[in-house]
Image (tube, helix red, strand yellow):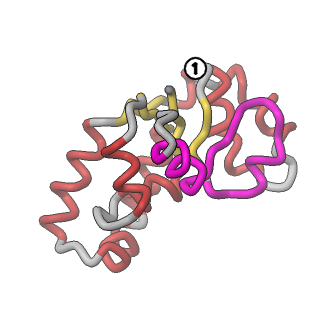
């Protein structure tokens, strides 16, 4: 399974005690996201530190582990799908890069944002749905 991670899922994965982190390390999948999500993670590092209760050193180690398991794409690599994605997400176009990336690499999206489920171009799984798939042996 190819999974495109949105930035909120990526932030959740940074907390080693979260359900998202457990899933990330347990499911057999290829993980992808945008370079922009990586920039956002660095931008909101202090928030991640606070929520995860990790020390700065622990955070850096965790970041290295997580980044090693994800392929990051530049916008040039999925820009041909961007307009289609924007048109499919009129209420929240800021998430269109994740949709465009999923379209370009024929992947599904891992996101807990309900508006992403409203589009019909690609399948979107929430953390809860992925836990259910893992527990049922589907993934």
- Classify mark 1: residues with Cα within 10 Å, few (<14), some (14-19) or many (20+): some
Q: Magenta stretch: residue 122 in it?
A: yes
Q: Residue at x 25, y 37 (%)?
A: 68
Name the residue that disc number 1 marks: 105
Q: Residue 97: image x %, image y %?
A: 64, 38
Question: Which of the pair 83/129 is nearer the observer?
Answer: 129
* Residue at 68% over, 36% down: 99
Q: Is residue 96 magenta?
A: no
Q: Is residue 51 left or right of residue 102?
A: left
Relative to 115, residue 79 above or below: above
Does residue 107 appear left or right of residue 115 in this picture? left
The region drawn magenta spans 112-135
Figure check: 58 above or below 131: below
**What percent of the width, then of the height, locates residue 29?**
42, 31
Q: Residue at x 19, y 58 (%)?
A: 60
User: Residue 57: x percent and y percent?
Assistant: 12, 65
Is residue 17 placed above or below 2 in the rendered structure? below
Query: Is 90 on the left or on the right of 14, as rendered?
Result: right
Q: Secondary structure at mark 1?
A: helix
């Amino acid at each position: 399974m190819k999974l495109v991670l949105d930035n909120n899922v990526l932030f959740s994965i940074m907390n080693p005690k979260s359900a998202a982190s457990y899933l990330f390390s347990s499911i057999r999948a290829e993980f992808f996201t945008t370079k922009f999500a990586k920039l956002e993670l660095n931008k909101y590092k202090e928030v991640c530190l606070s929520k995860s209760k990790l020390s700065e050193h622990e955070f850096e180690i965790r970041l290295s582990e997580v980044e090693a398991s994800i392929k990051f794409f530049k916008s040039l690599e999925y820009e041909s799908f961007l307009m289609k994605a924007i048109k499919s997400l009129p209420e929240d176009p800021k998430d269109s890069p994740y949709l465009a990336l999923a379209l370009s690499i024929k992947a599904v999206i891992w996101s807990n944002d309900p508006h992403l489920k409203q589009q019909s171009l690609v399948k979107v799984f929430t953390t809860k749905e992925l836990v259910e798939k893992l527990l049922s042996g589907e993934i």
